[in-house]
Amino acid sequence: MKNATIISGLGMTILCILFSCKDSHENPPETYLSAAEIFQDYFTLGASLSVNQIQGTDSLASNLIETEFNSIVPENCMKSEAIHPSEAEFFWEDADAFVQLGMSQKKEIIGHALFWHSQCPPWLFVDDKGNHVSREVLLERMKIHAHTIMKRYDGKVDGWDVVNEAVLDDGTMRKSPFYEIIGEDWVEQAFSIAQSAQTDAELYYNDYSTAIPEKREGIYNLVRQIQSKGIRVDGIGMQGHVNINSDDPSIDNLEKTIQRFSELGTVMITELDITVLPWPDLSKAAEISLNAEYKEEYNPYPDGLPEDVSLKLHNRYMELLNLFIKHSEDITRVTFWGVYDGQSWRNYWPITGRTDYPLAFDRKYNRKAFIDSLHTSLNQPTI
Ligand code: XIL
């Protein structure tokens, strides 16, 4: 009986994928539930928003944002190079519009990212001669940066990625300018600064490839040590940049990471996307400094996804989301890194000009079948 149910469920899934039976933006049936509603008993469902989406220039994407997600994070406009381009100047227009959009649609609003070695403005680490500033000067700059932004959105932004990607895959500290100038305790200082802004937002550490055992332990020890000094780190974000051509991260390693991090606070799956494209270096999931030259062999599906790859993607999403549902006591949020395939950063990073299929909504803004398959399986009585 159980096998029969599984087989017929799988049959439906394949039919759904092959004939693209969802057409969510055109004719939602009466009983239609948004993706956020489907997962509402488990976690909030987020998407990162590009500046175009914040400005509402793509009305179909705006519809998806409004109806399908209940949590948002800015893809770029709150990064330091965008929001704090020169020492004396903050650029608020896009960030204000982002927060305004979230407030008017009553969404959970996540700020990303106060301190990250990438997408920094050129002035941040240097004096007017181009030499590194002192530890004291950088800490003071960080304080002005974080306090000004956090206080502006106090009561509106629910949580901040305070520090992004400070640990390397081997579990040691990344030798970023923050580390070089401030020293080993820079992450502790960053959280202390964020805490001293005294806003009501939660404070998060966020990183990629957290299922690598050495990296998992490196992050765990770092956060635990900071917390042991009475400094708040409320949760850890596990970036979800996955490649379909790799068995990593394994479900086992992901599960161990969720369990380990949950000892310290809430766990969030941030930046979820699954690329189906060939990868220059499969061992590096989201190392932003990677890039490679375009070659046709790196862009195998410009006109559509073959059925076997589509099914593989479907199944990988199913196993990941089932794991997150299993651990929904600890996981508060699952955020996709983008709204729909056509605008995903995966189309332009680490190689520009490719066609990727990494998100929950396809190029025609239709919801992919894995969301509805999960919905069906969640409603099936356990035998
Ligand atoms: C990416 C954006 O999606 C791109 O538009 C931008 O060009 C580079 O950054 N880890 C993070 C995100 O924490 O901020 C990155 O976002 C993806 C990797």
Image (cartoon, rainbow, N blue to C red):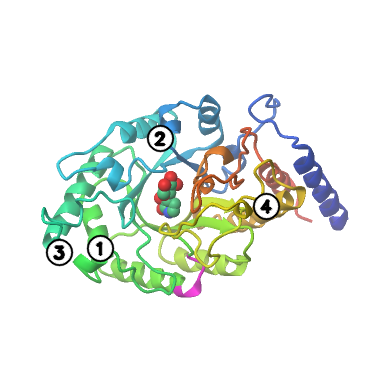
Badge 4 local density, few (<14 within 10 Å), some, or many (20+)? Answer: many
Identify the element where label 3 is drawn. helix
| Magenta span dominant secondary structure | loop
Task: Report the amino acid beneath label 2.
Answer: Val
Q: Where is 92 relative to 12, above or below?
A: above
Q: What segment is highlighted magenta in the picture? A: 210-214
Image-based side of 83 in relation to 74, left or right: left
Number of numbered labels in the structure image: 4
Q: Nearer the viewer, residue 37 or 371?
A: 371
**Which is nearer the N-term, disc 3 or disc 4?**
3
Q: Which residue is mark 2?
A: 51
**Which is nearer the N-term, disc 3 or disc 1?**
3
Task: Report the amino acid beneath label 4.
Answer: Leu
Measure how far apart labels 1 and 2 are at the Cα level.
Answer: 27 Å
Identify the element where label 2 is drawn. helix
Q: Which residue is mark 3?
A: 135
Identify the element where label 1 is drawn. helix
Point 21% across, 48% down: residue = 145
Measure how far apart labels 3 and 2 are at the Cα level.
Answer: 33 Å
Q: Which residue is mark 1?
A: 177
Q: Within 8 Å of ligand 1, the CB of disc 4?
A: no
**Which is nearer the N-term, disc 1 or disc 2?**
2
Q: Position of residue 369 (x, y in %)?
A: 70, 42
Q: Which residue is mark 4?
A: 313
Image-based side of 72 in relation to 8, left or right: left
Residue 213 among magenta residues: yes
